[in-house]
Image: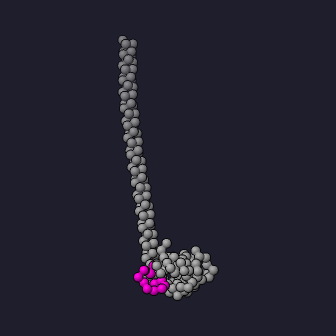
Amino acid sequence: MDNAIQILADFIVEDKTAVIVFLNENGYADLPLDASFMEVNRAVSRNILDEGFVKKLSEVIFPFRGVIPPSAQAAAEASAGAGSASSGANPATWIVKVVEIGADLFIQAKSEENQRLATYAQYDLAQRQVRDQTEIAKQKAQEDFLLELVKAQEEKAQDNTARNLILLLGVVAFLGIAFYAVKRTTK
């Protein structure tokens, strides 16, 4: 965990009321004084990308160095750099560090959102392709059915023609026989 986040986390744990008062007075949140740590953490995280918020919050944190546990103070001093001659954390370094962390987290969240959107776009494209292929297959099946229907009707027409021809030949033959029979009886 980064030192700047550790300093902030320790300060919220040690003096949650001061953070709540800061958030409420500056219009960043509207929390009751008995708000849970999670509510305070959410309110801080919603505003952490605002550099003005971070600067104002650092003014609240650093005047109360005695409240910060020694481990967090040591972490803050380490984040100030080895070449620093000061005995405490450097608020400017802390501000830059918190803003960097917030920006990195924002970039990471944006990247994840872009990946998610790309995945959704690929999914939508695949769905459209499946829908288009299904429509094409449906149209092909309809055309095939139409061809089969026409073919069956043509076969039926050919069968009817052959049957009609046979019937016609049968009628002609009958008439011929009948004519022959009538002619023979009249002689």
Image colouring: one colour
Residue 181 location (% of width, % of height): 39, 15
- Looking at the image, residue 151 sits to the left or right of residue 63; the answer is left
Instruction: Please determine whether, in this image, residue 15 is positioned above or below residue 122.
Output: below
The residue sitting at 59% across, 76% down in the picture is 37
> Who is closer to the viewer here, 27 or 104?
104
The residue sitting at 42% across, 71% down in the picture is 107
Q: Quadrant of the C terminus?
A: top left
Could you tell me if residue 28 is visible in this image? yes
The residue sitting at 52% across, 88% down in the picture is 63
Could you tell me if residue 164 is visible in this image? no
> Residue 122 falls in which quadrant of the image?
bottom left
The residue sitting at 39% across, 42% down in the picture is 144
Q: Residue furthest top?
A: 187
Residue 186 location (% of width, % of height): 38, 13
Asked whether 89 falls inside the magenta stretch, the response is yes
Residue 97 location (% of width, % of height): 44, 78
> Who is closer to the viewer here, 56 or 1?
1
Residue 62 location (% of width, % of height): 51, 85
Residue range corresponding to the magenta coloring: 79-91
Asked whether 10 falls inside the magenta stretch, the response is no
> Who is closer to the viewer here, 92 or 44?
92
> Residue 147 falls in which quadrant of the image?
top left
